[in-house]
Image (cartoon, coloured by chain):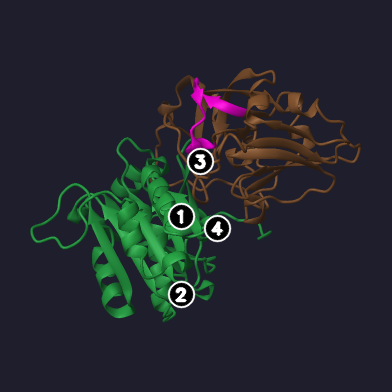
Chain colours: A brown, B green
Amino acid sequence: MSERFVTRGFVGKRQDAGTAANRIPPGQHLVKDFPVLSAGPTPRTDLRTWSFRVEGLVKEPAQWTWDEFGKLPAQEFVKDISCVTKWTKLDTRWRGVSADVLLEHVELDGRARFVVAFSDGGYTTNLPLPDVINGQAFVAYEYDGKPLAPEHGGPARLVVPHLYFWKSAKWVRGLRLIERDEPGFWESLGYNNHGDPWKEERYSGD
Amino acid sequence: MKRTLEWQIATVKAIRQETANVKTLTLALLKWVPHRPGQHYDIRLTAEDGYSAQRSYSIGSEPERHGEIDITVERIRDGEVSPFLDDVVVVGDRFEVRGPIGGYFVWEASDGGPLLLVAGGSGIVPLMAMARHRAAVGATVPARLLYSSRNFDDIIYRADLDALAKRDGLQVFHTLTRSQPEGWQGFARRIDDRMVAEVNKPFGPKAQVFICGPTALVETAADAAEAAGVAAERIKTERFGPTGA
């Protein structure tokens, strides 16, 4: 990107952002609602058959039923989230289990470098392992004090708030540790492989 | 799709009022490339002081129209970009765009059918690109559109849809959820399971389904298509609503 091309007559409504302006990544705008974006029908999984797995390059995979997952140490997370479709929502409040807690239950193979999150409905998204650990990612089952609604990814979704929100896989059922990066669903369809909103990594080549 | 999407300057070539609060802007692009129907462009507007805003807009035109694209913009009250595009922009104005973007919610004639399109309000835009493409290439893929609008005067592309129905065999089913003109023959309620099943009846589980509109409509129509026997992987959805402000 070189010189910005000024649009005749455009002023903008930056007062919307107010004092939070420095929390809104470039090209994003603030929303108060919580838009729903999905590529297909909302899957509805019976909690009796739901499970969550950590698998791949680990010594022994770990797996939890819904009840077991609910007994894992949970935390509250208050995070700003940004969707590649240009909206940013501040101070979203979640409850769930840190990816660090989940990874404590397995012994990682030294070759593990990347993580693929996989979901009901076949959705996948890929993340470098360093973006998943150290308190940066969690599996949420409550939003704003209530069970996470199916259209927002319930019963449980991955949340990786420092990356564009397509990385926060809805209806997540597990994490697979891998050695070589594998593009996920949107990453294979023209979207950026990494997705850092502060670097505007929206599309391939950004 | 590994190429970098570069920003380019689009020139507004024509403006057409579609309904009271919806306009179509025809943008001439020097670095035009054919899009896949269903894709969108990003628009970036920049103020004198460098402040800029971006939004995504679906392409409403068919890729067979070379050198230009149509975007159709619904004016969102209290919005930042859509009121600017509605009030300020005139033919000859220029702003930055990049695209086409999106590789999933797309349909090309070679993908076959039968095709069930379900739209609510301005969610018609990417589906219109599919319907126009189908007509432009003379495809005989059976296609049905179920389109929900509030009132008769809110139907976007009404005349164009009539023409596609008359000339190109697109079967159009309107529903009007708020008010209906005298003698209205179409549906007169929100899209529900029964309506989707009725419109999809000749296609059954073979339908390829594209749904675009407000969240509640998308959720309802997608569930209804599944209930009608269409496999989830044949149902593609896109939300289109006030977030595009």
Q: Chain of mark 3?
A: A
- Residue designated by label 1: B226
Residue sitting at the far left = B182
Within 10 Å of the Cα at label 1, are there few (<14), some (14-19), or many (20+) other Cα atoms?
A: some
- Counting every numbered tag in the picture gives 4
Front residue of A109/B58: it is A109
Q: Which residues are magenta?
A: A140-153
On whether residue A113 falls in the magenta region, the answer is: no
Spatial CA span between label 3 and label 1? 30 Å
- Which sits earlier in the primary sequence, circle 2 or circle 1? 2
Q: Amino acid at mark 1?
A: Glu
Q: Is residue A62 visible?
A: yes
Front residue of B39/A75: it is A75
Name the residue rendered at 53%, 75% in the picture: B110
Q: Amino acid at mark 4?
A: Glu
Between label 3 and label 4, give the one nearer the viewer. 4
